[in-house]
Image: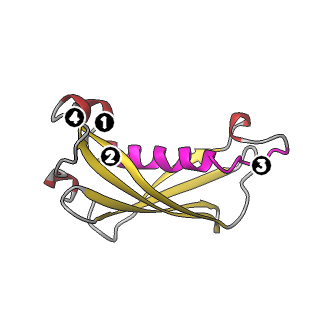
Amino acid sequence: MNEGLSFSYPIRVYWEDTDGGGVVYYANYLKFLERCRTEWLRTKGYSQQALAIDPGVLFMVLRVEVDYRGPARLDDELRVSCRYRPDSRTTAWFDQTIHRGDDLLVEAQVRVVCVDAQSLRPKRIAEYLHE
């Protein structure tokens, strides 16, 4: 994905995502963000599992900054978006948002590092992910 372009993924809020009041539990937003990044990768033709085998790389989260702007509730239809920003040879940022309709609920910046699946040492991010 070219820098500046955004990918979106729809998610519905299920009972398991909420607390006793029917509001999404704050940590579950991280799962929604992760799903979006995984689906972004799939649109490029790669699965996390396949990349772990060949070429033998994993992506690990280094940092997460989250601003919670509003609550999501049981049965809400959400749109989770991400924008990929390469940071260095081994790291990248994902600028992410979660919306319900036009309402911005969550803004997040997630920094990931590409690592060798065996040694867990940093490894250069393949050029095909930058395209």
The residue tagged with tag 3: helix, strand or loop? loop
Q: Nearer the viewer, mark 3 or mark 4?
A: 4
Question: In this view of the protein, which residue sits in the foreground, 74 or 65?
Answer: 65
* As drawn, 85 above or below 61: below
- Residue 32 on the magenta segment: yes
| First along the sequence among labels 3 and 1 | 3
Q: CA distance from mark 2 to mark 4?
A: 22 Å
Q: Which residue is mark 2?
A: 41
| First along the sequence among labels 3 and 2 | 3
Is residue 23 rendered to the left or right of residue 81? right
Which image quarter is the C terminus in? bottom left
- Image x and y of residue 26, in percent: 67, 51
Q: Which secondary structure is most common in the magenta stretch?
A: helix
Q: Which residue is mark 1?
A: 47
| First along the sequence among labels 4 and 1 | 1
- At label 1, counting other C-alpha atoms closer than 10 Å, the crowd grade (few under 14, some 14-19, many 20 or more) is some
- Residue 27 on the magenta segment: yes
Question: In this view of the protein, which residue sits in the foreground, 70 or 1?
Answer: 70
Q: Which residue is mark 3?
A: 23
Q: Which residues are magenta?
A: 21-41
Question: In this view of the protein, which residue sits in the foreground, 66 or 41?
Answer: 66
Q: Which residue is mark 4?
A: 119
* As drawn, 124 above or below 5: above
The residue tagged with tag 1: helix, strand or loop? loop
Q: CA distance from mark 2 to mark 1?
A: 7 Å
Inspect the image, locate mark 1, and give the three-letter code of the amino acid beneath it.
Ser
Q: CA distance from mark 3 to mark 2?
A: 29 Å
| First along the sequence among labels 2 and 1 | 2
* As drawn, 105 above or below 115: below
Inspect the image, locate mark 3, and give the three-letter code of the amino acid beneath it.
Val
Q: CA distance from mark 3 to mark 4?
A: 40 Å
The residue tagged with tag 4: helix, strand or loop? loop
